Amino acid sequence: MSNSTSLGRMQQVDLRKVWLSESGYFTPWLAQDDNISLLADTLGMDLELEAQEKGVGPYRADIVCKDTTDGTLVLIENQLEKTDHTHLGQLMTYAAGLDAVTIVWIAERFTDEHRAALDWLNEITGENISCFGLEIELWRIGNSPIAPKFNVVCKPNDWIKGKSSGGGGGVVTETKQLQQVYWQALREVLAEQKSSLKPQKAHPQHWLNVSIGRSNFNMAATINTLEERIAVEVYMQGADAKRHFKQLEADKAKIEKEIGHTLDWRELPEKETSRILLMRPNSSIKDSKTWPEQHKWLAETLERFNATFRPRIQSLPTAYGDDEVEAG
């Protein structure tokens, strides 16, 4: 680059010049799909809007989303000025009323006291509650369109959060500890590959959920320690799980051709869930020397499952008429 190259200068824009109020302007803007997606990317989640101005008793929460990775609720509270005690109290009230497990507080600026309050909540709540603090900024270069930017100023400590076994407390066994390390290593492999997949945090459990972009659906990598095998699966739940399963099964030949393997299709009529799996035998996680090979297989299989199932899952009906004939 020559020394004469002219570069633009970034200029910060006052939030109030774009959004005159939180409820009338900022919250409706944030609730739009593209902007929820921007927030989700900042948080490392896959969010789906549930409600705007959600009623909680006599109060109203700004935005409620669902984390499609695990189906849990995410509460979002907005402020177009520095944080204050009123909004902190509202967050606690809304979170309790909605049974939310993730709290996201967005403000123009966080005070040291409120950042410390969120850090303290993250420490004392174990895995049950996760608190994020984000500062929102607006920037432009010359006459360019104004661009938003979220800065994470407070987030959960993943290491502390991962010490409990599914939020139930108790002693974490040696096998559970090994599972957590195994999943964290897989997350790092996906990050190094700059994968677009969004796995959940590594927990001491036999599965790792990966969002596939729709509520009641998930991908997962799983471990069966006793049978020494690993697997990748798509599973579905909810009132329409069986109908969704049958519609996917109707496309079985094409799906298996795209995946490159015969899959294990489990409708599970006696349960509320259905699953579609691909298993890899002779894969013991107790032999850490084989982890790179196992993680390579899991990463590649998750990518193939995502490419094959995601568009099909997105196109499935959100509701079925009473007279609609099930596929299969």
Image (tube, helix red, strand yellow):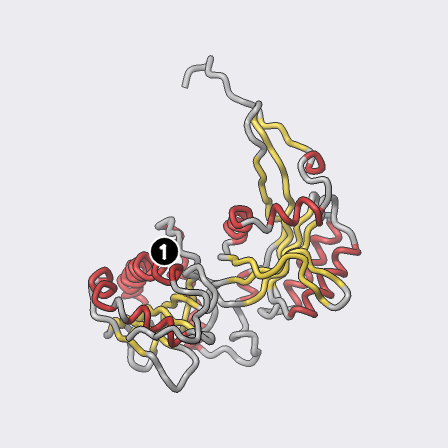
Secondary structure found at label 1: helix
- Tell me the residue at 38%/49% (across/down): 194
From the viewer's perspective, tell me whether residue 24 is left or right of residue 132: right
Image-quadrant location for residue 130: bottom right
Which residue is the site of mark 1? 189
Quadrant occupied by the C terminus: bottom left
From the viewer's perspective, tell me whether residue 112 is left or right of residue 212: right
Of residue 80 and residue 269, the one placed in the foreground of this image is: 269
Of residue 15 and residue 318, the one placed in the foreground of this image is: 318
Q: Is residue 165 above or below residue 104?
A: below
Q: Position of residue 19 (x, y in %)?
A: 68, 40
Q: Position of residue 27 (x, y in %)?
A: 65, 49
Image-quadrant location for residue 82: top right
From the viewer's perspective, tell me whether residue 40 is left or right of residue 103: left
Is residue 86 visible in the rendered image? The answer is yes
From the viewer's perspective, tell me whether residue 16 is left or right of residue 316: right
Q: Is residue 69 above or below residue 164?
A: above
Q: Position of residue 248 (x, y in %)?
A: 31, 68
- Tell me the residue at 52%/52% (across/down): 40
